[in-house]
Amino acid sequence: MSDTGTETEAGARPGPGAPLLPAPAAPREAGGGEPPRLGSFLARAAAATAVLTVLGAALGLVRDQAIARYFGASDASDAFLIAWTVPEMAATLLIEDGMALLLVPAFSLALSRRGAAAGAGTGTGKEITVGVGGAEASDPVRELVAATLPRLFLLLSGGAALLIACAPWVVGVLAPGLADPRLAVDCTRLTAVTVLTFGITGYFSAALRAHRSFLPPAGVYVAYNVGIIGTTLALHAVWGVRAAAAGVALGSVLMILTQLPVFLRFVPLRRPRPRRFGRRAARAAPPLGFAVLAPVILFVVSRQSQVLVERFLASTLPAGAISHLNYAQKVAQLPMVLSLMICTVTFPVVARAMAAGEREKARLRVERDLALAGTVVLLGTAVVLGYAPQIIEVLFQRGAFDASDTGSTAQVMRVYALGLLGHCLVGALSRPFFSSGRPTWFPAFAMGTGLVVTTGAGYALTYRFGVDGIATANALGISTTALLLLMGLGTRVVPIRARSVAFSLGRLAGASLAAGAAGWACAPLVPDPVLSLAAGCLLVPAVFLLTGLALRSPELTSLLVPIRRRFLDGR
């Protein structure tokens, strides 16, 4: 069985139900020596995803700029950021990781079964051809949606309602040090709707990515941030920081509407269920029981609990500490977000390869993804280390956000950047663990161990070093998790060469530190922050590349090969 069948091969008709980017040709099995290649389709999908991701990230910066301009680093912004914990947690659990890790393999398996049923029906005459347009056919994809989406809607609706009712208790647990929690409670009730809306968004995203439609899922954060920015600008004078919380609710609804038309083209909601083949189709639906759900949920909750620990510790510090930590994280995480785009696009490819038992292909694909993601995130780390004050001044220093806020935020951001490689590796390595759709508890164990390190280091360092201690604890905890996942992946799921990957990333890290040090030394030489940052965007990559070549980093050496051969031909 091919590891990447086209949608037409899987039974879907071209035309109205076709993905926004054309489906790729299925790579042929070549004896296990070559990875599932990106090909022209996935290369274009990665490029389109990158454009929309960058646009969403840019609008996220505009959103943070608006909040910083109107509310600065104050009690009001702290209250909103406490409420912001809800959508942050929901986004990780329901959009970025949890839902994708569960449903991309499930939809990929259902699509494979749809294609197998179609082939059996056409070739033997004993089975009915399964297709999107066939009224008589039993579609495993549609059966999966019918078995999971209604239950998910009811579960998430109950969760959102419970969170609204328990908002005072939630705020008390998240930030017991707040002097007046009423504003945070109001904002939390407004953001609680994201428990439902993010869940539906994540469901649609997983389904569309499995169908090789990447543009609508990549565009959801564009719609989300447009809703927040528009509501904040329109209503901040009337509602204060509650306007930003209302914008979170509105933006989350726009995320659903962005994907709904394409989702309905792939999976029409109204279609009669076949009588003769209903039981067979039900048995064909991929299992999503407690044994599969629990490890994913525990892993994602443990990962996002790092934010809960940080907010809890920061609530005991002077007003503005939570805001400084938040702004530093948001900016520093941009390289990580960009680095994980390739893993997001290739996740269905790895899942198909694992389902087909092509472990060697999966290994080569995962190793290549780790190399690409590590290169991007470490280059971004060097820029952050070298030019953190200039970045924060250009982005945020206006209105209520003054020079002292810039200095505090930049210092935290430099510390936080030390853990960016760990964050990137956790995101990249967790996908192969869950690509087979089978229960695996090791990622949850690794994430739990990292959370223990974060919590212990946070309590030990916060009293003495303030928000810098919290950022240091975050870097230590996530790096511990990344190391455990890297060591465990090769022996449990995909037989990657962990030692080789570690040495390769070590060379890139050396290049990153050298480039960051060069930027740190040269940044003050140009007084104007915009010009200094512009110069740094030339200096840091140049030093990073030259140092990497001197260290004989294969990833940077390969950049000398023509781009087409590297990304399109997969050589």
Image (cartoon, helix red, strand yellow):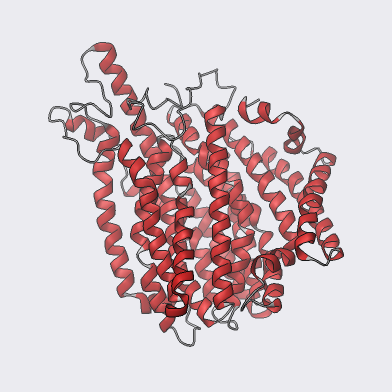
Which image quarter holds the C terminus?
top right
Q: Which residue is at a point 53% across and 76% down the rendered structure image?
A: 77
Q: Nearer the viewer, residue 303 or 334?
A: 334
From the top left corner, tell me how far across and down residue 18 is, in percent: 38, 31
Residue furthest out toward the top = 124
Residue furthest out toward the front = 234
Q: Is residue 399 left or right of residue 249?
A: right
Q: Is residue 438 visible?
A: no
Which image quarter holds the N terminus?
top left
Q: Quarter-wise, where is residue 470 in the image?
A: bottom right
Q: Nearer the viewer, residue 176 or 337?
A: 337
Residue furthest out toward the left = 275
Q: Which residue is at a point 18% across and 32% down the rendered structure image?
A: 279
Q: Which residue is at a point 54% across and 79% down the rendered structure image?
A: 315
From the top left corner, tell me how far across and down residue 350 is, in percent: 50, 34
Q: Which residue is at a point 40% across and 73% down the rendered structure image?
A: 188
Give above or below for 400 relative to 555: below
Q: Is residue 169 left or right of residue 4?
A: left
Q: Nearer the viewer, residue 82 or 533?
A: 533
From the top left corner, tell me how far across and down residue 191 is, in percent: 39, 68
**How many circles with numbers are drawn on the protein?**
0
Q: Nearer the viewer, residue 519 or 375?
A: 519
Q: Is residue 132 visible?
A: yes
From the top left corner, tell me how far across and down residue 432 is, in percent: 51, 40
